[in-house]
Amino acid sequence: MLLFAGLGNPEEKYKLNRHNVGFLLIDKLVSVNNDVSFKKKFKSLFSEIEIKKNKIIAAKPQTFMNLSGESILEIKKFYKINNENIFIFHDDLDLETGKIKVKTGGSSGGHNGINSIDEIVGNDYHRIRIGIDHPGDKNLVESYVLNNFSDNQLKIINKIFDKILDNLSFLIDKKFDQFSSKVNN
């Protein structure tokens, strides 16, 4: 069993914020797998889907970004999922909009959602970093991530989501270099 969790903030006003790119991806993943329903449990909205004969828990923590680890821990414990089978999709200011990088472990890069997961679950899980660009000034970061994507950025994000979903088999098989190559070309 695998856990695919997208990070974001739960209120409707945040729906299209740059910080919610993880939620947007999970919404698309669940909808293309013929399950548009989410259940509420584990401080999360989640759905059980199957890809390549793998049962996947697709989750959107509802604890707000800074407490994402609480939800991830509850799912991990209930389903007995090892960290090497946890995949977290989140925004990354240091990447150009739509660029993807995959990494396992390491620093949170100052991302509060990742900090929360690292503190509670450990940091030896997989992170799929989705680029949202940087506003150019660190004083503008909070406002920038909590504002909606521009129309052009949203088009780029939707295209990269299609590439991610088309190449999930590489991610599931942990062929991260191949996955990155396919989605970034």
Image (cartoon, rainbow, N blue to C red):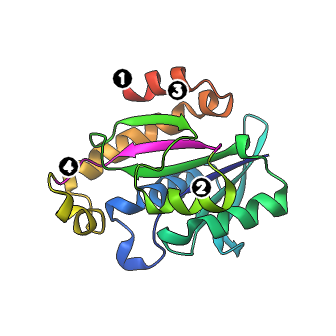
Q: Which residue was labeled with disc 2?
A: 118
From this view, report whether residue 72 is shown above or below residue 182: below
Which mark is on residue 185?
1
Which mark is on residue 152?
4
Q: CA distance from mark 4 to mark 2?
A: 33 Å
Q: CA distance from mark 4 to mark 3?
A: 24 Å
Contact between labelled residues 4 and 1, with CB atoms less than 8 Å apart? no
Front in this rendered view, residue 159 or 76: 76
The residue range painted magenta reads 124-135
Is 9 included in the stretch rendered in magenta?
no
In the image, what residue occupies the spot 56% across and 26% down? 176
From this view, report whether residue 140 is shown above or below residue 106: below
Please state which amino acid type lies under the numbered disc 1.
Asn
Please state which amino acid type lies under the numbered disc 3.
Phe
Q: Which residue was labeled with disc 3?
A: 179
- Where residue 98 sits, quadrant-wise, is top left
Q: Position of residue 121 (x, y in %)?
A: 68, 57
Is 130 included in the stretch rendered in magenta?
yes
Q: Earlier in the sequence, mark 4 or mark 2?
A: 2
From this view, report whether residue 120 is shown above or below residue 106: below
In the image, what residue occupies the spot 49% across and 45% down? 107
Contact between labelled residues 2 and 4, with CB atoms less than 8 Å apart? no
Q: Position of residue 73 (x, y in %)?
A: 71, 63
Front in this rendered view, residue 43 or 13: 43
Q: Position of residue 145 (x, y in %)?
A: 29, 63
